[in-house]
Amino acid sequence: MLKQTADYLTFDLLGLTPGTHLGESLNFFLYDTAKIFLLLATIIFVVAIIRTSFPPEKTKRLLSRKREYVGNVLAALLGIVTPFCSCSAVPLFIGFVESGVPLGVTFSFLISSPMVNEVALIMLWGLFGWKIALIYIGTGLLVAIVAGIIIGKLKMEKYVQDYVWEIQVGTAEIVEQTFLERLGYAREYTLSLLKKIWPYVVVGVGLGAFIHGYVPADFLVRWAGRDNPFAVPVAVALGVPLYSNAAGVIPIVHALMEKGMAIGTVLAFMMAVTALSVPEAIILKNVLKNRLLVIFFGTVAVAIVLVGYLFNAIL
């Protein structure tokens, strides 16, 4: 239905010719925009109802009682239902640290929340199918868990800014909600999140449409194909400055895959864009001392590169 509507608008109503740069770009833009917003509105509403069982205060209490390893796994899983970008996850990260949650566990959450969430799952599933979606979610969780464990084992608490440890936390009361209240919350949350991310979706789909229609296939295959041994680290290096969330980057990823970029390289690029960013580093600089900040970015970047190479080798 959506594809037929996009074809009608592009080729019948506007009279563009199939196979032309403009025609293919506009058709890609109309179809992917409609599909992504439909998926987002439906699934975010459902996930929002689930999220009412995990308010921040309950999450803090739950994680603070867990040992390392178990806490890392749980924190990474909780990142799925907390769809923050890398910057907006930082305040909750501070709250976890000053609530007594182990540092490595908090880093597992900080990595997982922007990289592995329902927005990424929905859009990847819709664009690439369930196998690619589950591969990305699984590897994203693995990166978050392993990186968090490594940072925890390094005992880097002394490299957190002193003021973070001095903040006193009150114990907020957890208010239970009725089902109707949860439905109301889910509606408001869905509308609020869509209002925040729709520009990312439109811009992301627009860039993806441009790549789809205008960038020659051999250009990307030559620079980021399977034969280039440095394609993965180059993709990660390019992804870090491109601050975005999953909603903005997945349409670009879709277009890159259609042009022949290897799946591992594409996944590494997406992980770098969503989990590591220059704005995030600037914000974290006020929370972490330089040594821990460098270790955090370096550990995650190396893990992402290894994931990219692994999937280029097996897929």
Image (cartoon, rainbow, N blue to C red):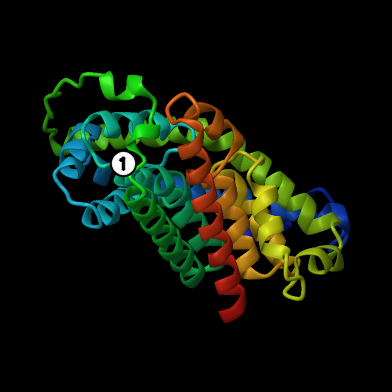
Q: Nearer the viewer, residue 221 or 101?
A: 101
> Mark 1 is on which residue type?
Leu
Q: Horizontally, is 208 left or right of 166 in the view?
A: right
The structure residue drawn at horizontal position 39% and vertical position 37%, both measured from the top left corner, is: 190
Residue 68 in percent (x, y) is at: 23, 52
Q: Which residue is mark 1?
A: 103
On screen, 5 above or below 60?
A: below
Image quadrant in which you'd find residue 65: top left
Q: Horizontally, is 298 left or right of 240 in the view?
A: left
Number of numbered discs on residues: 1
On screen, 96 above or below 149?
A: above
Image quadrant in which you'd find residue 3: bottom right
On screen, 17 above or below 288?
A: below
Image quadrant in which you'd find residue 256: bottom right
Q: Nearer the viewer, residue 117 or 171?
A: 171
Q: Is residue 85 visible?
A: no
Secondary structure found at label 1: helix
The structure residue drawn at horizontal position 22% and vertical position 41%, both measured from the top left corner, is: 54
- Quadrant into which the C terminus falls: bottom right
Residue 276 in percent (x, y) is at: 55, 44
Q: Is residue 238 visible?
A: yes
Q: Horizontally, is 32 left or right of 40 in the view?
A: right
Residue 25 in percent (x, y) is at: 78, 53
- Quadrant into which the N terminus falls: bottom right
Q: Horizontally, is 4 left or right of 87 in the view?
A: right
Q: Nearer the viewer, residue 67 or 86?
A: 67
The structure residue drawn at horizontal position 33% and vertical position 44%, both measured from the top left corner, is: 155
